[in-house]
Image (cartoon, rainbow, N blue to C red):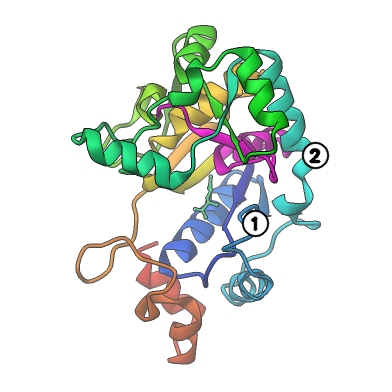
Amino acid sequence: MSVFRFAPSPNGYLHLGHAYSALLNADMARVRGGRLLLRIEDIDETRCRPEYEMAIYEDLRWLGLSWEEPVLRQSQNLAAYQAALDALKAQEVLYPAFESRAEIARFVAECEPWPRDPDGAPLYPGMSRQLSAAKRQERMASGVPFVWRLDIAKAIDRAGAVNWQESGAGPAGETGAISASPAQWGDVILGRRETPASYHLSVVVDDAAQNVTNVVRGADLFHATGLHRLLQMLLGLPEPAYHHHRLILDAHGRKLSKSSQATGLRELRGQGKSPADIHRMTGL
Ligand code: GLU
């Protein structure tokens, strides 16, 4: 049976773009006689808030959506991400990295132009990758903060060619059999000392644990899919089918943000819009 999921992060109120994604998932699940799951992606403690989570349930119910209970909340699933992190450590494709964000930014500023990932963030320069095993142990034992990074070159070497099947389209219209380039992300962070998870790791762990067969989400996550497939291959997880949908843009052609009042579902509801109006406004 087909299993779809809508996986918002409770770090702001939902807007038209979320409504489109949730409604599209629900429509596709209905057409295929499949299941629809809701997953709360709340591992970022600094940005996620309970009131946003409550608002997600309320706004989605108002839209007329229903989903299976219990809802998986990632903040309560850290042991699963820790296990995946440990499996990757055992494959020696992770290493601890000790530089602060400011240190990396300073280094990159001195070396501009510096390569960037598809989201525009500078690639990690790799200082900690070279450390000897003894030095790594010594630094970790000293109590300095560190993150776990994926040695992307080693990981790609292990996994081989990475690809996926796309039934929607990427930002440049890419569709069909996609040959991924996860190297464009560099040595991404997969876990932190205090939280054994990152978006990229938790999303693949949960999609597999929840038997998700169809990942339907915004085109802004198209390039991340290469990284997700790489992690699935390393962890021996099944491959879902992917469908990246168009993004709903504001009047200036920009991606909607969670703080933009004009397209917030609560604001639209306050203005007297009905769920049918929202359906229409998303172009569904
Ligand atoms: N939690 C992510 C977001 O709100 C979506 C993750 C996904 O659909 O894979 O952008």
N-terminal of the pair, mark 2 or mark 1, is 1
Q: In the figure, is residue 221 to the left or right of 266?
A: left
Residue shown at 45% from the left, 70% from the top: 15
Q: Taking the image as drawn, is residue 118 in sight?
A: no
Q: Nearer the viewer, residue 211 or 254?
A: 254
Q: In the figure, is residue 11 to the left or right of 182?
A: right
Question: Which amino acid, mark 1?
Answer: Asp
Q: How many marks?
A: 2
Q: Secondary structure at mark 1?
A: loop
Q: Is residue 83 above or below residue 51?
A: above
Report if the CB atoms under discs 2 and 1 are less than 8 Å apart: no
Q: Nearer the viewer, residue 24 or 102?
A: 102
Residue shown at 48% from the left, 91% from the top: 270
Residue 60 — which label? none
Residue shown at 61% from the left, 55% from the top: 44
Q: Is residue 192 above or below residue 280?
A: above
Q: Which residue is mark 1?
A: 42
Q: Which residue is mark 2?
A: 79
- The x and y percentages for residue 13 are 52, 73
Q: Nearer the viewer, residue 135 or 223?
A: 135
Question: Which amino acid, mark 2?
Answer: Ala
